[in-house]
Amino acid sequence: MQSENPLLADIAKLMNSAAGTVAGMGREARDAARERLKEGLGGLDFVSREEFDTVKEMAAKAREENEKLAERLAALEAALAKKK
C-alpha cells in the first residue's frame, strides 16, 4: 500500500504549474517577437508575392503589346516607303 506524501504532491503540482507557465511565456515571447518584426519591416517598401506576380504579369502583357505595335509600325512605315 502506497501512502501519498502531501509535500511531494504539492511539489508535483508546483512543477506542473511551472511547466505550463514556462510554455505560455515561450508562446508569448514568440508572438511578441513576431509582432515586433512585422512592425520593424512594416516601414520598409516590401510588396507581397501576390502584388509582385500581378505586376510581373502586367509587364509581360505590356511587353507583348509593345512588340506587336512595333511590328505594326514597321509594316506601316514599309508600306508608306513603297508609296513614295
Image (cartoon, rainbow, N blue to C red):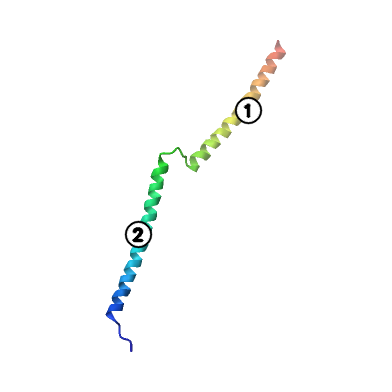
Q: Relative to 52, is 73 on the left or the right? A: right
- Give the answer, above or below, for where 8 lies relative to 22: below
In this rendered view, identify the residue nearer to me: 62 or 14: 14
Residue that protrudes farthest toward the right in the picture? 82
Q: Position of residue 53 (x, y in %)?
A: 53, 40
Query: Where does label 2 land, which residue?
Result: 25
Residue at the image position 40 percent from the left and 43 percent from the top: 40
> Label 1: how many residues lie within 10 Å, few (<14), some (14-19) or many (20+)?
few
Residue projecting furthest to the top? 84
Give coordinates of residue 46: x percent, y percent. Answer: 46, 39
Q: Earlier in the sequence, mark 1 or mark 2?
A: 2
Kindly indicate the quadrant of the structure image that contains residue 42. top left
4 is higher (above) or lower (below) than 25: below
User: Where residue 58 sits: x, y (%)?
Assistant: 54, 34
Q: CA distance from mark 1 to mark 2?
A: 59 Å
Pick whichever, 82 or 29, lies toward us.
Answer: 29
Residue under the image location 58 percent in, 34 percent down: 60
Quadrant in the picture for the N terminus? bottom left
Choose top left, top right, bottom left or bottom right for residue 81.
top right
Residue displayed at 61% across by 31% down: 64
- Secondary element type, mark 2: helix
Q: Residue furthest left?
A: 6
In this view, the mark in front (1 or 2): 2
**Would residue 28 be found to the left or right of residue 71 on screen?**
left
Residue 66 locus on image (x, y percent)? 60, 27
Label annotation for residue 67? 1
